[in-house]
Amino acid sequence: MGTESTITDEFKELKTVVIRFAGDSGDGMQTIGERFTDSSAAFGNDLATFPDFPAEIRAPAGTIPGVSAFQIQFGSTEILTPGDAPDALVAMNPAALAVHLRDLTEGGMLVVNSAAFTEANLKMADFESNPLEDPELTSKYELIQVDINHFTQESLKDTELTAKDKLRCKNFFALGFMYWIYSRPIDNTIDFIREKWSRKAPALAEANITVLKAGYYFGETTETSRNRYMVAKAEVETGTYRKISGNEALVLGLIAGAEKADRKLLYSGYPITPASSILEMLSNYKHFGVKTVQAEDEIAAIGVAIGGSFAGNLGITGTSGPGMCLKAEFIGLATSTELPLVIINVQRGGPSTGLPTKTEQSDLLQAVYGRHSDAPIPVIAANSPSDCFETAIEAVRIALTFSTPIIVLSDLYLANGAEPWKIPSVDGIDEIQKPIAAEGGNYTTFARDEKTLSRTLAIPGQKGNEHRIGGLEKDEGGSVSYDPDNHEEMTHIRAEKLKRIADSFPPTQILGEKSGKVLVLSWGGTYGSITAAVSAMQAEGFSVSSVHLKHLHPMPNDLKDIMDGFDQILVPELNMGQLDVLLRSQFLVDTVAYNKVQGQPFKVKELTKKIHELLQD
C-alpha cells in the first residue's frame, strides 16, 4: 500500500497514498472526497485529485451507470497525479465495488458498506452471488466490512430526522473512519459543515458532525483495521498555500490579468459542463469591477463579450466543445475587427453531448483551424489546475498586446481536479501595457505597431477618434474595401501578426537533457502523468526528456531545434493524434503518436511502458 518509508508500533508511515471513494451518485462521494482533500491540504500534504462522476443528473440508484467516485493521492513528496491505482477503496454499494474493484492494488484496503449488499442491489450490479462471501476477496485485499447504515442510524437515534435523512449522513461516517485510518484532522470538516448547513439546516449540520465523529471513533473502539497510516507533511517552499481547482485558478488569473492591464473584466457565458462554474465564480468578484452576463445562448454570449472589448473592457467568454461550434462565426468577427477577446474552452469527451463529465483533448484542431476563411488566432493550453492561473494571465497579455482573440484550452481533468497552490505576490506579476488611443489624436483604425502589427483601440465616444469597424473587409483607415489587393494584404498581415506572437515567448523549458533518444512532446492536462513517468525513467538512467507546450498556435520558435536533438519524438494525447498532425505538417518531422480516448487520463505506467518500447526499437 502506497510508498512505504518506516513502520512504528502504532502507525505505518507512508510517503504517498491513493484513496478512492465510490458510491451511488446520491451518496455524496464528491463531498467527502473534497473534505478529505481539504483536510490533507490543511495538514500540509502535497496532493492531486480526480473527481469522476456520471453525466446523468440522477441515474437509477444502485446501478452501475449511477456510480460516482473521487480519487485523491496525497503524500509527503511531490505529487503530480491523482495516482494510477487506489491503495484503498471505499465502496458504498455493490455497483461501486463492481466498477472499481479491478483498479484496487492487490493487498490494498477495501472498506465496504455491508448493509448495501442486499439481494436487490447485488442484482442491479450484475452480481450472481454476494462478493463479500468470496474467499478470494479476503485473500487479495484487506477487507473491512462495516454496517455503515446501522451505525449511522444508531448514532442519530435521538434526533428528530427522518430515517431517510439519517441515512443521507452515512457518507460522513465513511469519511470519519478514513480520517481515523489515515490520521487526518477532522476539525476542518466540522468547521465546513457548520459554515455550510448550520444556518439553513442546523439539525442536519449537527447530525453530519455526529456521524463524522462516530465514524472516526469507530475504528478505535472496534479495532477493525489492522493498521493505521501516517503521511508526513510535504517539504515545500515557504509561502501561503491554498487548495485550488483549474476553474478556480482560471477565474483568479483572469481577474489578475485584467487588474494588471487596468481593464474592467466583462465575462459573458452560457451554462455548459464543465465550464459553467467559471461564470458562477466570477459573479462573486463584483468588488473587483467584474461584470458577468448569463446570455440566452452561446452566440449571444460571445457577442456580448466582443461588444465589451469594443467598449474598452476586457471581453471574455467561456464554454466547452459544442459551444465552440456555435461561437465560431463570432470568433471570425473578432479576428476581422482585431479586438482583444479571451475565449476559454474547457474540453470534455466526445462530439455532440458525448461524454460531458469525462476528459479529453479533442478540440485542438478545432481551436487552431475551426473557422471560415483564413482567420488565424493564437491558442494556448493550461497544464495543471494551478497553471490555469498563469495561463489566464498569459491569455490576457497576448489578447491585449496583439489586439487579437485568443483561445485558452483547459479540460475537465484540470477544471475539476485540485492541488495545493502557492499564492503569488501581486507585485511579482508583470504589468500588461496596452494603452487606449489618446482622445483627439489622429486616430487611424488599422494603424499598426511596427513590432507586433497590432492596432490601438479607441473607445466609442472618444472625441476625435470616431471610426468604423465591422465584419466586412476594411482598408487601413477602417473603410469597407472590396479591393482584391487590399484583401490579400490584410489577410497576410493577420497571418504575420500571429507569427510574431511567438517572438514574445520565453525559451522552451526541457525536462532533462537537450538531446537524447526519446523526447516526449505533449500539451494540456497530461503534464502530471508525463512528468511523473519521464522523471522516474530519468532517475533510472534512461535517455528520455520531455517538453510540455503551453503555446500551440503559433508554436515556439525554438521547438524545431529541440526536436532535432532527439532520435524519436513521442506525442501522447487524449485524442486521435491532433498535436501529432500539427507537428508533422508544420515541421515535417517523423513522430510517434500515442493516443487514448477513453474519457480517462493517462496512467503513469501506461506512459512508462510506451517509452520503454521506443527505447528498445
Image (cartoon, grey):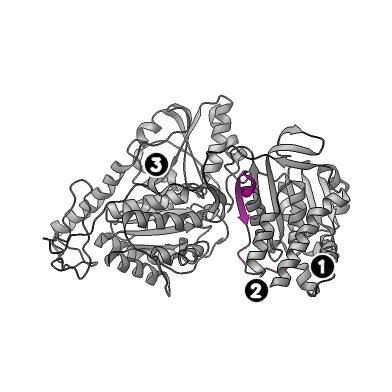
- Mark 2 residue crowding within 10 angstroms, few (<14) / some (14–19) / many (20+): few
Q: Is residue 586 magenta?
A: no
Q: Which amino acid does the dot numbered 1 rest on?
A: Leu
- Observer-nearest residue: 540 or 241? 241
Q: Is residue 389 left or right of residue 336?
A: right
Q: CA distance from mark 1 to mark 3?
A: 61 Å
C-beta proximity under 8 Å, tags 1 and 3: no
Whether residue 235 can be seen here? yes
The residue wearing badge 1 is: 156
When asked about the image quadrant of residue 91, the answer is bottom right
Q: With respect to residue 393, does 610 lie above or below?
A: above
Q: Position of residue 549 (x, y in %)?
A: 42, 42
Whether residue 125 can be seen here? no
**Earlier-in-chain disc, 1 versus 2:** 1
Write the residue at 24% across / 56% down: 435
Q: Nearer the viewer, mark 1 or mark 3?
A: 1
Q: Is residue 51 magenta?
A: yes
Which stretch did the figure color magenta?
41-62
The residue wearing badge 3 is: 583
**Of helix, strand and loop, which one carries label 2?**
loop
Q: Give the label on residue 200, or none.
A: 2
